[in-house]
Amino acid sequence: MRLSRYVLPVLKESPADAQIVSHKLMLRAGLIRQQAAGIYAWLPLGLRVLKKIEAIVREEQDRAGAVELLMPTLQSAELWRQSGRYDAYGPEMLRIKDRHDREMLYGPTNEEMVTAIFRDTARSYRDLPRTLYHIQWKFRDEVRPRFGVMRGREFLMKDAYSFDMDEAGARHSYNRMFVAYLNTFARMGLRAIPMQADTGPIGGDLSHEFIVLAPTGESDVFYHANWERPAELSAVDFDDVAGLQTIVSGYTADYAATDEKRDEAREAEAGEALRQSRGVEVGHIFYFGTKYSASMGLKVQAQGGEEVVPHMGSYGIGVSRLMGAIIEAGHDDKGIIWPDAVAPFPVGLVNMRVDDAACTAAADALYAQLQAAGVEVLYDDRDERGGAKFATMDLIGLPWQIIVGPKGVAAGTVELKRRATGEKVDVATADVVARVA
Ligand code: ATP
Ligand code: MG
Ligand code: MG
Ligand code: MG
């Protein structure tokens, strides 16, 4: 993509209303524009990152055996009356009437709808277990939308729903998501800590919030120092019930809790190793038994012919919130530092002197070679000062910068800069594509 033909409205100054660094940088780097409180347009560069985050989430859901569908954003009030949640949900729900005066709502979550779909399609034990998921916009009329996409009113969520014949099956479905979540966040360079969360009236230990530590996070969290290690990927067979349980038990062995679920005994046990911090909830998984299946009349036939009410769980990831969390974890005073996995473009190509024929010819040739090699590249071919181009590249945080200047071109070299470290090396022009591909 040539920057001269792109839409990248970067800002020099931080907008006054942005309080935290990720929000400031998202506005300054031209990723989003606010359209109303908590409602954002995703500008071209921001959309590219959102799609990359979404793709990682989707791959890990698929790997864990979940099946994708797409449910609408608008739902009928009738559906929510069946579960009894229409009145209970409160003012966070955006309620709408259509021209026939039918009550509708913009979905804040999809338990009711997915239960109704499963009720209308699943007949017997052969149709279970299943986990369905979608990646769809949600609306919650938050009292205090703030921090940009971290607490929006309209936001993108991945939500999955599992259906099992019994509680043991549901636990396995839960464990699949537990491990899939850790892998998902690890691929984005994030250490998300699974913290025991409130299960409400059902009880048990089957609810975890996945929290990324950040001083600007909205949750108060307490955890064992063992969590202060880089995130790792688990290579697992998601059908191995015992193996998966072992991994989950391993992860839950080290204490971690939000302030609602603090455990004095375990904190005493942690002693000197107890840490306190703030964090961002990027995911939440939940087993809730037959709450929706029972209230909405979902039943399937068991092998022996008797009717069974399936056990369910739901599993959310804040896809758009993750972008804020990733920036909170990766930035410096110059701007964003994207992890390779979600960078809008892995490479930025800078032509220092568009008025210099040899320099432009060399930059154009590299642009063509990078594209031919399948490397997504943002090519700064604008007639601007070098300093402004460097500042823009550092602000938008592409992992690699290739800088083409007249002196280097004469010597057959370009400069290769790694955004994360600031390290710069001269590289033979002929070798640079291979270095970044
Ligand atoms: P919070 O505690 O931050 O209000 P929640 O517990 O209400 O979140 P869930 O119902 O668990 O949210 O939804 C699943 C995920 O959706 C959350 O873990 C979070 O990552 C994301 N999410 C929830 N509300 C918002 C929001 N207003 N803006 C962006 N993402 C959100
Ligand atoms: Mg909430
Ligand atoms: Mg929460
Ligand atoms: Mg939650």
Image (tube, rainbow, N blue to C red):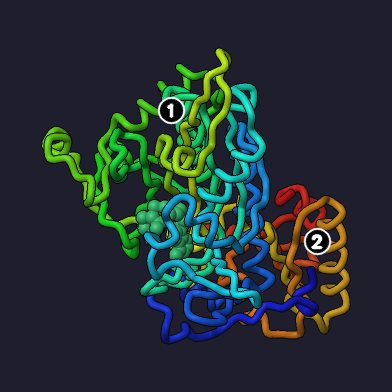
**Front-most of residues 290 and 144:** 290
The residue singled out by tag 1 in the image is 171
Label 2 CA crowd tier, 10 Å (few <14, some 14–19, many 20+): some
Residue 62: mark: none
- Disc 1 marks which amino acid? Arg
**Picture layout, residue 303 above or below residue 348:** above
Residue 34 place in picture, x, y as percent:
54, 80
Residue 6 place in picture, x, y as percent:
75, 76
**Picture layout, residue 407 above or below residue 189:** below
Q: CA distance from mark 2 to mark 1?
A: 60 Å
Residue 353 place in picture, x, y as percent:
77, 79
Q: Quadrant of residue 119?
A: top right
Is the residue at mark 2 in contact range of ligand 1, meaning its CB lies under 8 Å from it?
no
Please indicate whether residue 202 sits to the left or right of residue 377 in the image.
left
Q: Give the residue at x 42% y 72%.
A: 147
Q: Give the residue at x 65% y 38%.
A: 67
Label 1 CA crowd tier, 10 Å (few <14, some 14–19, many 20+): many
**Picture layout, residue 9 above or below residue 44:** below
Residue 412: mark: 2
- Disc 2 marks which amino acid? Gly
Quadrant occupied by the N terminus: bottom right
Q: Give the residue at x 25% y 56%.
A: 220
**Front-most of residues 376 and 145:** 145
Q: Nearer the viewer, mark 2 or mark 1?
A: 1
**Front-most of residues 377 and 271:** 271
Secondary structure under badge 1?
helix
**Quick check: marks 2 and 1 in contact, CB under 8 Å?**
no
Q: Earlier in the sequence, mark 2 or mark 1?
A: 1
Residue 418 place in picture, x, y as percent:
59, 58
**Picture layout, residue 306 above or below residue 175:** above
